[in-house]
Image (cartoon, rainbow, N blue to C red):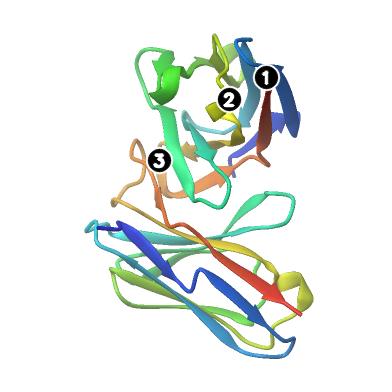
Amino acid sequence: DTAVSQTPKYLVTQMGNDKSIKCEQNLGHDTMYWYKQDSKKFLKIMFSYNNKELIINETVPNRFSPKSPDKAHLNLHINSLELGDSAVYFCASGPRGLGANVLTFGAGSRLTVL
Amino acid sequence: AQSVTQLGSHVSVSEGALVLLRCNYSSSVPPYLFWYVQYPNQGLQLLLKYTTGATLVKGINGFEAEFKKSETSFHLTKPSAHMSDAAEYFCAVSEANNNNDMRFGAGTRLTVKP
């Protein structure tokens, strides 16, 4: 039973389109995250939600809009896709008060913008 | 904000040789430090973590890391490399009093030669 699941795993689309990536965790964690991993493997935090409340919003274009309908889900919607959005997007979750605890990552969603 | 720097984007060792992956951190408060591993086309998995207490921490697959406050380092080692260790390794830091934010280094790709 997958702990953090992301869909779709692969997504190929044209510039200018709008797309969404969904994430669900069944671990009962309060906090969920979106990370972007670029072609050089650099992993950068984008957003963090704690029990549906936005905690961290890094310098991300406002074309990216996270939505958390409940604490088990954190979806990522991207408007007007650009070539530079091509990357692997990882969803993660962690218990409240990350501190000594760890993040559990999904398998990633590879987005390719043509 | 806290940050980590991984020295060397690519490390190559022979099978059976010592593995040393370097990580230095920056944090204004006591850090919690982590090493994650990413195998091809997979998400990140936790190798080990340091929070408090013993500065030498042991993780899975024979890896260990030592927290050295005076050097602000958390280098990852393994006495004898296996072919299966070939992967991307990420050092990460979170601050003990800021539990919703984890920052990753740029990653080090480990190659193991027969």
The quarter of the displayed image where residue B10 is located: top right
Whether tag 1 and tag 3 are in contact, CB under 8 A, the answer is: no
Check disc 3 and give the amino acid type.
Answer: Asn
* Point 43% across, 57% down: residue: A106
Q: Amino acid at mark 2?
A: Met
**Marks 2 and 3 share the same chain:** yes
Q: Chain of mark 2?
A: B
| Residue B77 x, y percent position in the rendering | 56, 16
**Which residue is label 2 attached to?**
B83
Q: Could you tell whether B67 is left or right of B57 in the image?
A: right
Residue found at the far front of this picture: B114
Residue A1 relative to residue B7: left or right: left
Mark 1 surroundings: few (<14), some (14-19) or many (≥20) residues within 10 A: few
Q: Residue at x 68, y 49 (%)?
A: A42
Q: Which residue is mark 1?
A: B114
Picture coordinates of residue B72, whole percent (x, y): 61, 20
Q: Residue at x 41, y 36 (%)?
A: B96
Front position among marks 1 and 3: 1
Instruction: Give the chain of mark 3.
Output: B
Q: Earlier in the sequence, mark 1 or mark 2?
A: 2
Q: Nearer the viewer, residue A68 or A92?
A: A92
Q: Which residue corresponds to the image point at 75% horizontal and 80% vertical from the top-left?
A: A82
Q: Mark 2 or mark 3, which has the lower sequence index?
A: 2
Circles 1 and 2: CB distance less than 8 Å? yes
Name the mark nearer the viewer: 2 or 3.
2
Depicted A79 relative to depicted A99: above or below: below
Q: In the rendered structure, which disc, 1 or 3, sits on the residue that comes first in sequence? A: 3
Identify residue for label 3. Answer: B97
